Image: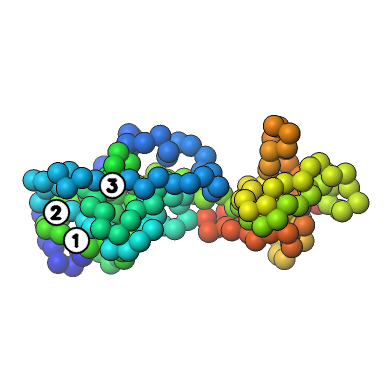
Amino acid sequence: MRLSRFFFSVVLTVSLFAFGTAAFAQEYDPNAELPRPVNPASAIEGLSGYLIVNTDNLFLRTGDRARYSPIAILDGGTRLIVRGYNGREERPWWYVEVGGYKGWVTDEFVVVRGDLRGTPITDVDGTILSPALYIGYAAPIYDILSPAGEVICSVAGNRFYQVVAQNFSADPTYFKIRATCGGATVEGWVQAIRGILRNSGGVTIPVLES
């Protein structure tokens, strides 16, 4: 809803204890292909109001900001069942249900249809995005902070890797990443110039010197 249009006679606060998908409890994999759920037209029959996605490739997220991990991608025209919102009068985020998934979408990219008065304020319990390094081409990772160190393995390109540390708080030259080598999970150092850091969650990355 555009909240300025409506008067709320009752505002309820609810806590989220159950979700339509287990994705909330899982570690977000930035390399995974996200589902594109939809609601049939019958899902909104009898509702006083609902939302329609008015852009393509809209993220359905675990929380009400871009710092929260996405669980699905929504196509333009997708109808959304409204279960709650975050209480903001300007540019709220909506807690919605679509195709068995429950998550959050920004008001900026949806259109209100009908009357959403009485929509409850809903607590946010999402998963913040972990910092990740996108590596475009195969790159070696080392056991110490130096190309003179032992190469643990060469990680594949065109993938994201979780960042667990960096060597400087500003302008790091190395990142320590978590990867799978030979079927085992390992941690090793890779030169910063080998990748592009994504940290939209604003997570503080630990600084290590070795």
Q: Which residue is mark 1?
A: 112
Which residue corresponds to the image point at 28% horizontal and 47% vertical from the top-left? 38
Q: Which residue is mark 2?
A: 49
Of labels 1 and 3, the one closer to you: 3
| Type of amino acid at the residue the image marks with label 2 | Gly
Q: Is residue 207 visible?
A: no
Contact between labelled residues 3 and 1, with CB atoms less than 8 Å apart: no
Mark carried by residue 75:
none
Direction from residue 71 to residue 92 in the image, left or right: left
Residue 167's place in the image compared with 178, above or below, is below
* Disc nearer the start of the sequence (3/2): 3
Q: How is the image coloured?
A: rainbow
Q: Quadrant of the N terminus?
A: bottom left
Q: Which residue is mark 3?
A: 38
Residue 193 position by quadrant? bottom right
In x, y percent, where is residue 24?
Answer: 42, 39
Which residue corresponds to the image point at 69% horizontal and 38% vertical from the top-left? 180
Question: Disc 1 and disc 3: Cα gap in Å?
Answer: 17 Å
Q: Is residue 36 visible?
A: yes
Question: Disc 2 and disc 1: Cα gap in Å?
Answer: 7 Å
Which residue corresponds to the image point at 70% horizontal and 56% vertical from the top-left? 137
Direction from residue 127 to residue 55 in the image, left or right: left
* Disc nearer the start of the sequence (1/3): 3
